[in-house]
Image (cartoon, grey):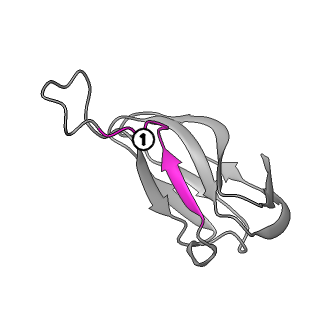
Amino acid sequence: MQVNGTTSAQYWQCLGVWAMAGQPVTVTVPSGVSAASGARLRIGGWTDWTYHKTKWYRLPEMSRWYSVNGTATTIGSATGGLVYLELPSGLSLGTVSVQVS
């Protein structure tokens, strides 16, 4: 998948892949996309924590993020979900190729 690596604001790019619950996926990115650049990978788009609720209708936290720790990062989640690449503002990487396996 091709992703715009030039950012004026922080954003999440959905990679179009669903990570199955409990199954690891490996995301491969170019060397310019790294934890040093502030890039992260996320499984699940649910960022509303519900710990404060007196009754839970689902788990209170269903989104999990990981720092990009090299060109290939293996991630997973107990609940599964869509896989996102989070890019910070101020990157000038142009079009970057991302692979999920």
Q: As shown in the figure, which amino acid type bears the numbered disc 1?
A: Thr
Q: Which residue is mark 1?
A: 47
Q: Quadrant of residue 36?
A: bottom right
Residue 9 location in percent, x, y? 71, 58
Task: Name the residue at 35% across, 38% down.
Answer: 62
In the rendered structure, the answer to whether residue 2 lies left or right of residue 59 reads right
Q: Is residue 8 magenta?
A: no
The answer to whether residue 75 is above or below residue 72 is above
In the rendered structure, the answer to whether residue 80 lies left or right of residue 6 reads left
Task: Name the residue at 65% across, 57% down.
Answer: 10
Residue 93 location in percent, x, y? 82, 68
Circle 1 — which element? loop
Classify mark 1: residues with Cα within 10 Å, few (<14), some (14-19) or many (20+): few
Report the predominant secondary structure element of the magenta stretch.
loop
In the foreground, 77 or 36: 36
In the foreground, 42 or 18: 42
Most extreme residue toward the right is: 94
The answer to whether residue 97 is above or below residue 21 is below
Residue 54 location in percent, x, y? 12, 28
Task: Name the residue at 42% across, 35% down.
Answer: 80
Q: Quadrant of residue 78?
A: top left
Most extreme residue toward the bottom is: 36
Most extreme residue toward the left is: 54
In the foreground, 40 or 24: 40
Task: Name the residue at 77% across, 61% down.
Answer: 8
- Total marks drawn? 1
Q: Is residue 46 magenta?
A: yes
Chain part drawn in magenta: 39-49
Residue 43 location in percent, x, y? 48, 44
